[in-house]
Image (cartoon, rainbow, N blue to C red):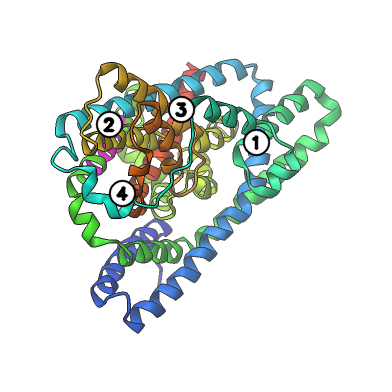
Amino acid sequence: MKLPSLNTQILLGAVLGLVLGAVLAGLGRTSPVTQQSLYAAGLVSTLFVDLLKMVLIPLVFASIAVGVANLRAHRQIHRVWVATLGFFVFSMAIAIVLGLSAANYFRPGADMHLAMFADATRGFAAKQMPLPEFFAQILHSLFQNPVAALAQGNVLSVVMFALILGIALVVGGERYRNLLLLMQELLELMLRIVGWIMRLAPLGIMALLLNLAATQNSALLGTLTKFIAVIIGTTLLHGVVLLPLILYLVTGVTPLHFWRGSREALVTAFATSSSTATLPVTLRCVEQHLHVKPEIAGFVVPLGATVNMDGTALYEAAAALFIANLAGIDLNLLQQTIVFCTAMLGAIGAPGIPSAGMVTMVMVLQSVGLPAEAIAILLPIDRLLDTFRTAVNVEGDMVGSLVVQKLVRA
Ligand code: ASP
């Protein structure tokens, strides 16, 4: 019997995972069937994510160094930098404006107040993160001992070191040709291994989503329905309408073509809630399915995975307004402008791991004097919201690579 294509298997796995998870949630957490299924799903999902993380660092390292080295040969590196950073800031700004507008219009949380959540916030101490300290922390995380960064899986410092190495490789010229060839071969090998890991993706994604659906806190979901609906609605609006529209206007790539090429990465991002763990899949989609040149993809996508987060930016801004409503505080235009800037910084600074946005959101709240403890209310529902925002974060990176390729060639 011929199996359906990998993409179809992944989508089937996702749907099956959600349905089985809902059934288990119905049986209750204490039922032995639920416990055993959750245990098995935990093993499979951990295996899948671990395998992706296994190839992540060598892949990012080789992909950026080779990308930069090849770009320099085309004398385009300057344009690629400008187009990439320009696109990142532009798309995150649109996402934040969307999040702020929706939160101002629908005013989630206006009919509730913080005191209702006294139990959740009591005893929860948010880590202090004033803006200057946050800045210093980002700057410090850029340049680290590369061996430590590689060993600890610190993607941003690996990206920076690989960039510098790539530049040095070309400036050095012919003399270092062998090392460049070696990196090229390493990159090809890693992508080959990613292809093998993806055969496990249908099962891995099923297990991740089963866990997610079976362990939701339904009481809290009920209380916060309006907020959840506003966040998911605006995140989808950005991901399904605005990003594809920008892509179409700039490159002429149709949404259907984009969806066909990108769905493996989008579903993996949704299930893992981690742009970083998804990165090997994102690179594969962009290079092999969407046909972005490796030198552009190798630069834009790994950098975007930690820097460009539209979903996170939108969420941090909208959630800050939600908490202001809960606290009974009306943020004026100046304060909302501060939220705009800090949400952008928070998204740039958040590493691509599950719930990272929650940590940098403390800084957004503190910048306008909101109680940081209030994020304790959002933590229990974060696993759910993180799915959508991570998928949009990854989508932004893929759209970015196509847009940059077009802008640089034009
Ligand atoms: N989980 C997100 C990501 O990996 C980051 C966040 O928490 O917003 O892209």
Q: Give the labeled residue for mark 1.
A: 157
- State the extent of the magenta-drawn residues as a range: 232-242
- Residue at 31% x, 53% y: name it: 120
Characterize the local packing of mark 1: few (<14), some (14-19) or many (20 or more) Cα atoms within 10 angstroms.
many
Q: Is residue 91 magenta?
A: no
Of the numbered discs in the image, which one, if any, rests on residue 377?
4
* Earlier residue among tags 3 and 2: 2
The answer to whether the residues at label 4 and label 2 have Cβ atoms under 8 Å apart is no
Q: Amino acid at mark 2?
A: Gly
Residue at the limit of the structure toward the bottom, as seen here: 32
Measured as percent of width and height from the top left, residue 339 is found at 35, 25
For the residues carrying marks 4 and 1, which lies nearer the camera in this image? 4
Measure the C-alpha gap from mark 2 to mark 1.
30 Å
- Please tell me in which quarter of the rendered image ligand 1 is found: top left
Q: Is residue 241 magenta?
A: yes
Q: Amino acid at mark 4?
A: Ile
Of the numbered discs in the image, which one, if any, rests on residue 99?
2
